Image (cartoon, rainbow, N blue to C red):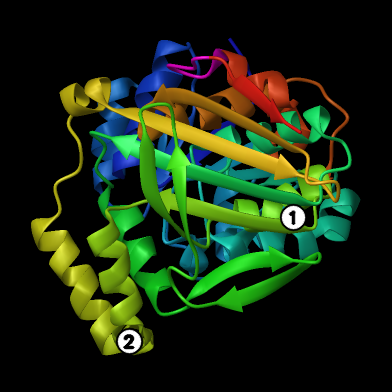
Amino acid sequence: MLSKEWMIYGANGYTGRLLVRLAKKRGLQPILAGRSQEVETLAKEHHFKSKIFSIDDVSHIASQIAGATLVVNCAGPFSKTAEKMMKACLKTSAHYIDITGEISIFELANKLDNEALNSNIVLCPGVGSDVIPTDCLAAYLKDKLPDATHLKMAWATKGSKSSKGTAKTAVEGMGKGGKIRENGKMKKVPLAYKTLDVDFGYGPQNTMTIPWADVYTAYHSTGISNIEFYFARPLRTIKKLQRFRWLFSLVRFKWINGLLKKRIDKTWKPSTDEERARSMSYFWGQVSNEKKEKTVARFTTADGYDVTAWGAIHVAEHLLTDHNQKGFYTPSILMGKEMIETMPGYSGIEFERNN
């Protein structure tokens, strides 16, 4: 059993609870923390310590996490929690990881790289299904085609439903449009900017570009300068999104944003354990170079939330051991692309080379 003190913040959320269950199964002893009294009840149920505090003031957060070697932030939307928690971790020399897929959080962590180096800590957002599978896939594809200039990746799910936290994060993102990387630079584009037919292994599927974090992280992990990320949706849904883009810009107004989030709180029902057990995630990637050579890869995993729980605990266990790493990392650089070999439901990667 690892003896260093560490904390799961947002432990009472849907994904946080999955982390707690897996941590207990692995014989770990995290401190459970969050803003709700539910945290204390959850901690007593699992015989863990608990702390209840809000993320409003960096100095207050630092006083609450003092002594911890690591903080795992599961409290989204991360646009509201990550910056203050990261800065508190810098003050107390605690490693910081989270389960975000928000591009802005990776940009922030990268900007804090020098401070992390000086504090001897690791800042590694995105240690869940948002980033680990595709970040590792990007690294494998880069190895297959070292002179690649373009990277496209896509994701599809069968049987999975989002948690309330993920749904709220999606609401926040709707008003911001899309993102791709072009010639090494981040570029803002409309929602569903491009479409692509992708064969995930069960026939061609309609996909559309989304601003997933790999548009940012895969550039740091591979150096490939043109990156697009796609998500499988029915063609009618894609066309509807494209037709009503102007409506999504209204989400930027706080009162509309708030109404949508309240609606989620009242009606949203995430996957049960049984539904997650039947769910699968499908990943696809393609790299190409100036000579028009291409390499395609695909693989499958278990449900994204089970992968997220595994990823966060897997990285936490690593950071709680002796190592010499510090600064900003993407998951594949921190842990090596081979980390996906122990991922729940991992099928192995199939490659196709087209010259």
In the rendered image, which residue does mark 2 sit on? 254
Which residue lies at the image location 42% right of the left edge and 61% below the top edge? Answer: 77
The reply to whether callout 2 and callout 1 are in contact (CB within 8 Å) is no
- Residue under the image location 88 percent in, 50 percent down: 117
At which x and y percent is residue 44?
A: 28, 28
Can you tell which of label 2 and label 1 is closer to the viewer? 2
Q: Which residue is mark 1?
A: 90
Describe the element under mark 2 as helix, strand or loop: helix
Q: Which residue appears farthest toward the left when viewing the image? A: 267
Q: Quarter-wise, where is residue 108 in the image?
A: bottom right
Name which residue lies at 69% across and 64% down: 181
Residues rendered magenta in the picture: 342-347
Q: Out of 169 and 249, give the one closest to the viewer.
A: 249
Name which quarter of the figure residue 318 lies in.
top right
Q: Residue 128 at what x, y percent from top left?
A: 51, 37
Q: Which quadrant: the N terminus?
A: top right
Name the residue type under label 2: Lys
Task: Give amino acid for label 1.
Answer: Leu
Q: Give neighbour class at mark 2: few <14, some 14-19, many 20+ (Cα, 10 Å).
A: few
Quarter in which the C terminus is drawn: top right
Look at the picture and state if 306 lies above or below 156.
Answer: above
Q: Left or right of 17: which side holds 351?
A: right
Residue 343 within the segment the image draws in magenta: yes
Magenta highlight on residue 173? no
Which secondary structure type mostly characterizes the magenta part of the structure?
loop
Q: Is residue 307 visible?
A: yes
- Whether residue 69 is visible here, answered yes or no, is no
* Residue drawn at x 34%, y 21% as measured from the top left: 47
Which circle marks residue 305 in the picture?
none
**Badge 1 local density, few (<14 within 10 Å), some, or many (20+)?**
many
Looking at the picture, tell me which residue is in the foreground, 44 or 313. 313
Q: Position of residue 229 (x, y in %)?
A: 55, 53
